[in-house]
Amino acid sequence: MHSIRTYAIYGLFLLVICVLIIVSSPQETRNRYQGIEHYYKITKEQMKKDLDYLQKMITEVHPKTYGGVPPEIRQAMQQAYREIEQIDNVWQFYFVTQQVMNSLKDGHSSILRPSEKIIEQLPFTYQWLEDCLYVTSSSGWLHKGDKIIEIGDKNEQELIEMLQSFVSYDNVHDLKRRTNTERILTIGPYLEYFGLADGHKVQVTVERSGKIILGEVDIQLRTNQPYPESKLFEYQVYKEDDLAVFRIDSFSPFNEYNKRVIQNFFETVRKEGVHHVAIDLRYNDGGSTMFGDYILSFLEIPSYRNLKTAVRYSTVVSQRVTGKPIDKDEMLYFESDPIPVKTHENTFTGKLYIITSLNTYSAATALATVVKDNGIGMIVGEAPGGKPTSYGDILSFELPESKFRLFISFKWIERPGTTLKNHYEDALQPDIYVPTTYEDLVQGRDPQLEMIKKLIREERQQERIPLSLR
């Protein structure tokens, strides 16, 4: 009797386990391409031709594939060939190709999405700051300033994990930057692909005045407005603060005109007798590293170590860079030998600050890294979107059938002060961390600049104290 009861209990236990497995396992995987429509159709033969070309460029250009294609990239390519069997338009194909680019784990290497004048999207804008997502334009029941808690039942951390499996990015700060500029969380095809949309609606949860509000937002057909870009290249002297601030939003182009403006800035600093200079790179997404080298040539330093580089020099790269293809594939290594800096009439002898944010990227991050690793100045602000050691220097290609614009890095760029401690850092940590809050944006405050002015005031007060009392 006891044995029969034991077997009955055991059988019931197995039955419960089986039911739980069946209930918890989806009967079919969600087709993430379903619902993503586009008038521009593309055949499987065309997509295969594009994938063949994409695979060739990645294999022959990117440093990560030198000496052999890593398993994760090979698997991503194999998956792409399988997935074109179930799609038929360019938006769907964009998602397939970008999954391949994501496998490189390189923010510089990516594919541009289809360009459209009108697109399905949510009717509000947002900004992803250090602490959270915020609504930046009112629409319907959503108010400007609402703190976004969830989009499509996904909280901030879940959104980050979701995007990390798709976006080409360097670190989480860069991930937020790209999500902002590409408006990934409001563009219809992205919402469909990530499963955030339910039909033509998206569920959004926000916090307003301490209250949690949940509602639905309709996806609408709207004009595709580009993300506003700033390209300021100007300076201002705050004489009363003994400070000159040079805001540079791009390191491109590096030409005689821009060199002259930089020279004029340091001439002004000398004539005004200013002892503190801040280079504002908070909106600088990169360009030429020669820009940063030229700025450093105005500092009173005997020398500094620059970035180390490894250049993938293949037939494709040599053809693009020099116009003369070479029939070999090699990596060329360049060490960071000391770069001497000569003093001149406009040499700056004071204190240097570099202001950074999550929008600081590529060559702009490189300048901040060189300044920090050489002890040349102080980094103030947020961690940059670019890695201090990363892939970079891109070549541009076009997929033959879809005409997608493709960017692939051909260099590995390493920080000059690599140590065991910082070797695996994915972000340059500022010397003084000063984030920008939504309240700062609303009130028009500049917390990073205010911090630098505060540091200068404290320095002045310290100088007034006799050495014996310090």
Image: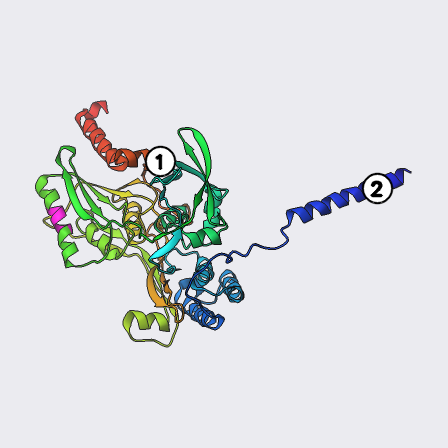
**Left or right relative to 140: residue 196:** right
The amino acid sitting under disc 1 is Gly
* Coordinates of residue 25 in the picture (x, y in percent): 64, 50
* Coordinates of residue 331 in the picture (x, y in percent): 38, 66
- In which image quadrant can residue 206 be found? top left
The amino acid sitting under disc 2 is Ala
Dot 2 lies on which element? helix
The residue that appears at 23% across and 57% down in the rendered structure is 252
Structural crowding at the residue carrying mark 2, measured as other residues with C-alpha within 10 Å and reported as few (<14), some (14–19) or many (≥20): few
- Discs 2/1, front: 1
| Residue 94: mark in rendering | none
**Is there any visible trace of residue 165 in the rendered image?**
no
**Left or right relative to 238: residue 125:** right
**Left or right relative to 32: residue 276:** left
User: In front here: 346 or 397?
Assistant: 397
Residue 115 vertical placement versus 464 (above, below) = below
Give the residue at the far bottom of this rendering: 327
Q: Is residue 67 highlighted in magenta? A: no
* Coordinates of residue 259 in the picture (x, y in percent): 16, 55
Structural crowding at the residue carrying mark 1, measured as other residues with C-alpha within 10 Å and reported as few (<14), some (14–19) or many (≥20): many
Q: Which residues are magenta?
A: 262-267
| Residue 8: mark in rendering | 2
